[in-house]
Image: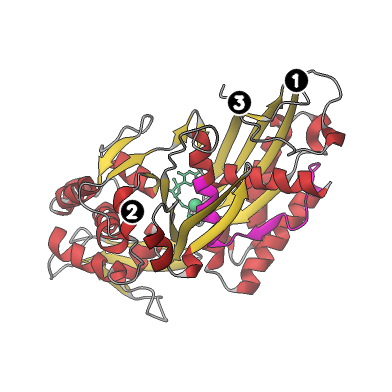
Amino acid sequence: IFSHTSPEMWFQGLFPPSVCPANANVDTFYGIMFDAGSTGTRIHIYTFVQRSPDQPLELEGEIFESVKPGLSAYVDQPEKGAETVRGLLEMAEDAVPPSHWKKTPVVLKATAGLRLLAEQKAQALLSEVREVFEESPFLVPDNSVSIMDGTYEGILAWITVNFLTGQLYGQNQQTFGILDLGGASTQITFLPHSKETLEQTPVDFLASFEMFNNTYKLYTHSYLGFGLKAARLAALGALEKEATDGHMFRSSCLPKQLEAEWHFGGVKYQYGGNREGETGFEPCYSEVLKVVQGKLHQPNEIHRRSFYAFSYYYDRAVDTDLIDYEKGGVLEVRDFERKAKEVCNNVDSYSSASPFLCMDLSYIAALLKEGFGFGDSTLLQLTKKVNNIETSWTLGATFHLLQLLGVSH
Ligand SMILES: Nc1ccn([C@@H]2O[C@H](COP(=O)(O)OP(=O)(O)O)[C@@H](O)[C@H]2O)c(=O)n1
Ligand SMILES: [Ca+2]
């Protein structure tokens, strides 16, 4: 079990005195955060302990569960979508003791999958989820079900990683940047040190916020449509076409003889290999390059900062044995390109894993190098969990939520 015993009072004043225990016994608090991602819905149940009233809360642990597909797959069946949330929320009734239900907040934040849906359809899904929350025994704060702004997605993940690695308290703070590659969007966030970065960055890429008695001005951006699965569609040319029905989208990144179909965001796509034309790394790389080239802001300072990378960066590195699933590891940017070459030039022997493996790896290499402008030898720390807690924006969001609740009382 993980707990932070920092000398800093990082959580001081977070909870209203009314819910703080009068005696010195250890008390436990819970927070429930749903991540409604484009490829799946996840529940994070965080446990915090307070050892005495004058001590800060400590994060003790996390219970995590997930279901697939994500809410956006239920675009025309919002009730069915909300049922997936109900199923996960039932887990929370087992994890949180009944005596704590009424003061345990539950919140759901949706990301890129719902951002991409028509406003009305997204709202219908969210309103069904709201009903599920209202029927639950938990505390439902105002605005508890919403689509999260991409800026927060990056900031909150940055808070999670830097909190878990101990960078947000004490001396010698050396924060890490984060790279998150989702299904539909991708985020880059870091704390700039140089004046140059602040001066040369568009204002909407900079965000200030306060946390744990510090003010941070972060470089952060969420690129909608640049997640791994959205990028597949872009590379296939399936985004430009109005009528996807019946059309076969072909790519040199796919096994030559392949023909298959794929559902994403409630739409069915048919895709296949380049029967007649070229296949392999070179033509594939130029296909995915078109998706990113000239489309992303390239901050110079990334060459001097260290980054944690997770989500699809992690998954694809695991799939190709670049890292161990449990341990993660450190990779150079060029490792993704090396693997992409290996896989793309032998697609048929890898296609049992996923026919998209060559395209995915090539896209990751192109995104890092030509998109963000990372160098070949830049080191990336690939991490899924730190001290057994998921490296997800959800922990940062829970801190923020608890802080808000404390203030409002
Ligand atoms: N707690 C989580 C949540 C997502 N993920 C990964 O995030 C990727 C999917 O992103 P997503 O469904 O959240 O999509 P977006 O809505 O972020 O674009 C997959 O690689 C998941 O394995 C994770 O590793 N851990
Ligand atoms: Ca995500």
Give the residues in magenta.
Answer: 135-158
Few, some or many residues within 10 Å of mark 3 (<14, 14–19, 20+): few
Q: Quadrant of residue 22?
A: top right
Q: Secondary structure at mark 1?
A: loop
Residue at left offset 26%, top offset 40% = 331
Q: Is residue 147 magenta?
A: yes
Q: CA distance from mark 2 to mark 1?
A: 43 Å
Q: Earlier in the sequence, mark 2 or mark 1?
A: 1
Q: Secondary structure at mark 3?
A: loop
Residue that badge 2 annotates:
302
Residue at left offset 40%, top offset 76% = 244
Residue 58 seen from this side: yes
Q: Position of residue 405 (x, y in %)?
A: 77, 46
Q: Earlier in the sequence, mark 2 or mark 3?
A: 3
Mark 2 vs mark 1: give the one in front. 2
Circles 2, 1 touching at the beta carbon (< 8 Å): no
Going by the numbered disc 3, the residue's amino acid type is Pro
Q: Residue furthest bottom?
A: 242
Mark 2 vs mark 3: give the one in front. 3
| Protein image colouring | secondary structure
User: Is the CB atom of the residue marked by disc 2 within 8 angstroms of ligand 1's nearest atom?
Assistant: no
Q: CA distance from mark 2 to mark 3?
A: 31 Å
Residue that badge 1 annotates:
26
Q: Is residue 349 magenta?
A: no
Residue that badge 3 annotates:
7
Q: Quadrant of residue 152?
A: bottom right
Circles 1, 3 touching at the beta carbon (< 8 Å): no
In the rendered view, does 226 fall on the left or right side of 26? left
Q: Quadrant of the N terminus?
A: top right
Q: Earlier in the sequence, mark 1 or mark 3?
A: 3
Going by the numbered disc 2, the residue's amino acid type is Ile
